[in-house]
């Protein structure tokens, strides 16, 4: 499984962005403040339905805009799926796969598994075992819902 492309609209500092990915290795490079981490956050959103930075969904809507959307074309063996997340200021978050809404986010978790470790996660090493348990629970929930 791999992400073929990603389209961002009004997501944080990306007013409109289309990115094509290689099935091999991809590098995201750029000057400070251009939105590299926001691209990673968008990919995390597609995986688990929320920001890895802990932001409220509404805080991820670009300034002076009413909504954001994140869309990706996912290649899975001989099948392609389109994942889309839409968050507006006026309604709750919508997560769709192939234009069909998930009734609850939990139904989506595990479709596109990911592990995100960032400098913000230094507490996994230095804090109590509770933070490590919480991290592991989040990872395991993507593969085993029980």
Image (tube, rainbow, N blue to C red):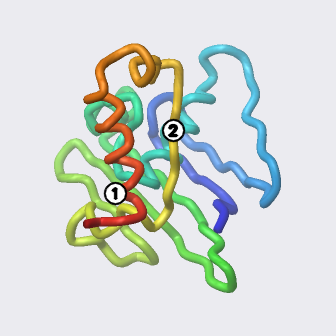
Is 122 left, or right, of 73 in this rendering?
left
Residue positioned most to the front: 129
Instruction: Give residue 80's quadrant in the image.
Output: bottom right
The spot of residue 44 in percent (x, y) is 47, 45
Q: Is residue 14 above or below residue 90?
A: above
Q: Is residue 18 left or right of residue 102?
A: right
In which quadrant is the C terminus drawn? bottom left
Which residue is pictured at 61% across the width and 44% down the height?
A: 17
Residue 59, percent from left and from top: 30, 30
Q: Residue at x 76, y 28 (%)?
A: 29
Task: Decide which of tag 2 and tag 1 comes sooner along the chain.
Answer: 2
Secondary structure at badge 1 equals loop
**Mark 2 neighbour density, 10 Å: few (under 14) some (14–19) many (20 or more):** few
Marker disc for residue 116: 2
Q: Residue furthest bottom?
A: 78
Query: From what the image shows, is residue 116 above or below residue 108?
Result: above
Residue in front for this viewpoint, 24 or 73: 24
């Amino acid at each position: 499984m791999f992400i073929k492309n990603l389209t961002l609209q009004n997501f944080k500092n990306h007013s409109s962005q289309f990115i094509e990915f290689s099935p091999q290795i991809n590098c995201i490079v750029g000057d400070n403040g251009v939105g590299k981490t926001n691209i990673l956050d968008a990919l995390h959103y597609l995986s688990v339905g929320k920001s890895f930075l802990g932001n409220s969904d509404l805080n991820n809507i670009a300034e002076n805009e009413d909504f954001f959307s994140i869309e990706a074309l996912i290649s899975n063996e001989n099948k392609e799926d389109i994942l889309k997340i839409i968050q507006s200021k006026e309604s709750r978050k919508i997560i769709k796969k192939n234009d069909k809404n998930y009734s609850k986010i939990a139904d989506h978790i595990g479709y596109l598994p990911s592990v995100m470790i960032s400098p913000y996660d230094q507490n996994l090493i230095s804090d109590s075992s509770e933070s490590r348990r919480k991290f592991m629970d989040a990872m395991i929930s993507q593969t085993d819902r029980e």
